[in-house]
Every structure is written in structure tokens, then in C-alpha cells.
Image (cartoon, grey):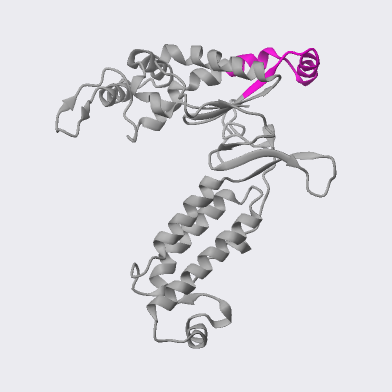
Amino acid sequence: MFEADIKACFDEIDHTTLMGRVRRRIGDKRVLGLVKAFLRAGVLSEEGLNRETITGAPQGGILSPLLANIALSVLDEHFARKWEALGPYWTRQKRCRAGEPAMKLVRYADDFVVMIRGSRGDAEALWDEVGSVLAPMGLRLSETKTRVCHIDEGFDFLGWRIQRRAWRGRAGKKAVYTYPSKKALASIIDKVRTLTARARHRTLADLLRRLNPVLRGWCNYFRHGVSSRTFSYVDHYAFWRIVNWLRKRHIGLNKHTLIRRYLPGWEIRDGGVEMFRPQVVAIERYRYRGTKIPTPWSSVTTGPAAPAA
């Protein structure tokens, strides 16, 4: 695996080369003018001075994701050509048996992973190859966020931990597991801790209205991986944080009165709002469907229009 990130280097992107790629995709000159003005708008420094932007794209702006994807399309094109050159499945297998590496790119915005079937030397050679592809755009790889690793070591990508491990229930076999990374888990725990801090909410219903969307959104993102145990841990942590929040809000109540009044049946609800429970979220493992996914253009016909009824 070749895991890379170039997030820190968009301040050096070449405007001329970038606009050339933008023109290939956008024909409206008014839109092109807006993009060009956005790139040259300048940056207001902390001292209140306007600094001209000859190179780079402002991070956090409304056009930044679009420009990042257009700039990094050079990587998509490069690795698409390499993949097509390998030929069909049986030809790729033959090349791999002969010791020729096969690689494929997976990219999301400015984070990408190149999966390679070959030696570690083949993976390390990608460092210079990717650098040479990005150089004309004025981009370079981030030294601190780029590394070469084996699938057995595992790596983090878009909040997921992807690693090949022993296959549970099948002795001697291995499988690739995708589960929430430690960083992603620490993030949701920190959000729950912040939301359940003492005196942040006036009522339990207010707390649940703030906490439920956070838990629901996090679980919906990670429900397509091996996340059952992680969901149970998050559920247990959030439940007892709320219980402790109630105990601190009602110091004069003993435990039994608190449970009878606010935790009937050990369920947390108030004012018609019930706590979202991560442990009951159904895990739906993702299955690759390839070309079976219909495209918006599959139903478009080029023949003559049908007569009106």
C-alpha cells in the first residue's frame, strides 16, 4: 500500500495549469471568470494586510473542493492509463506471476491510497512516480502524511482502519477488515463528553436533541464496516455519561428515585425525545457491485421522441 496526503501543499498550486484543466470541463466563460477571480482574490493576513495570491488555492473556501478534485484528476488519469495497459483479468494475473506489479488508485479529495500487488520496492518507487505526476500542477507530497505499508500492518483512510487479519471462525485464513479507526472513536467520545458536560443544557430533552444527531450521523457512516463492538462501546459510554449528568443535575435525589423518575426501564427519554442507541444500529456490510450500479445516463435514448399520448 502507498498511503499519501497532499493537503498541506495546495498553497503552491500553479494557477495557469489549474485553469487549463478547468477550461476543459467548464465552457461558460462567466464561470471561468469567477474561478479566476477566486484564485486571485488574495488573502487577508492577521495584520489586516491583503496578500496577493499568485499561486495556491484558498483552503476552506467554497470552491476549494472543486479545484482540489480538478487538480488531482492528473493522478486519476495517470493510474487509469496504467490500469488499462495491464489488460483484462487473465492478462493481469499472468503479468503478476511474472513479477510485474499491478496497482490501482483510490482517491477522495486530497487523500488517496495506491494499492499495489508487488514488492515493497515497487511501492517505494511510487513515491517518485506520484511526485513527478503532481509536479506540473505545483503540488508535492506531504512528507509527514505519506507512507508505504503492508496490508497486514493496516492503515487509516477516511476514518476507517483497514487491515488484513486472521479470519474469525476460519483457522489459517485471513480477511481484510474495515472498522472505525482509533482517531474516529476518540473524536466521537470527545463530542459526547463535551455535550454531556455539566450545566450545558437546561433539560434532559435539550441534551438528547443535541446528542442524538451526533450519534446517529456517526453510526450511519460506520455501519457498513465491522463496527458492532465499537457501537456497543459508544452506546455504553454515552448512556452512563447521561446518567452521571442526571445525577449531577439532581444531587438531592437518591439512586432509586432518579431511576424511577428519569430512567424507567433503564431507558433514557424526556419530553417525547428518546436517546438514540448506537448498539441497536444494524450492520450492513458493503458489497462491491461494480457495473451493476445504474448510471443517470443509462435510461437516456438517442432515438426519435415517442408520440404524445
Residue shown at the point (55%, 13%) measured from the top left: 129
The relative height of residue 222 versus residue 245 in the rendered view (above or below) is: above
Question: Relative to the observer, which residue lies in front, 230 or 244?
Answer: 244
Q: Is residue 81 magenta?
A: yes
Residue shown at the point (38%, 17%) measured from the top left: 18
Give the residues drawn in magenta, as a range: 79-104
Pick out the residue farthest to the left: 48
Residue shown at the point (15%, 33%) measured from the top left: 47
Q: Is residue 190 left or right of residue 150?
A: left
Residue shown at the point (16%, 27%) measured from the top left: 50
Q: Residue 22, percent across and down?
A: 39, 19
Question: Can residue 130 be seen at all in this image of the molecule?
Answer: yes
Q: Residue 183, percent across and down?
A: 51, 46
The relative height of residue 56 versus residue 235 in the rendered view (above or below) is: above
The prevailing secondary structure element of the residues shown in magenta is: helix
The count of marks equals 0
Question: Can residue 271 be seen at all in this image of the molecule?
Answer: no
Question: Relative to the observer, which residue lies in front, 247 or 305?
Answer: 247
Task: Tell me which corner region of the image, top left, top right, bottom left or bottom right, holds residue 160.
Answer: top right
Q: Residue 270, percent across and down?
A: 45, 77
Q: Quadrant of the N terminus?
A: top right
Q: Residue 76, percent across and down?
A: 54, 21
Task: Tell me which corner region of the image, top left, top right, bottom left or bottom right, holds residue 234.
Answer: bottom right
The relative height of residue 96 versus residue 58 in the rendered view (above or below) is: above
Q: Is residue 305 left or right of residue 135?
A: right
Task: Tell me which corner region of the image, top left, top right, bottom left or bottom right, holds residue 299.
Answer: top right
Q: Is residue 82 magenta?
A: yes
Question: Relative to the observer, which residue lies in front, 13 or 233?
Answer: 233
Q: Quadrant of the C terminus?
A: top right
Q: Is residue 182 left or right of residue 178?
A: left
Question: Relative to the observer, which residue lies in front, 187 or 30?
Answer: 187
Q: Is residue 85 left or right of residue 69?
A: right
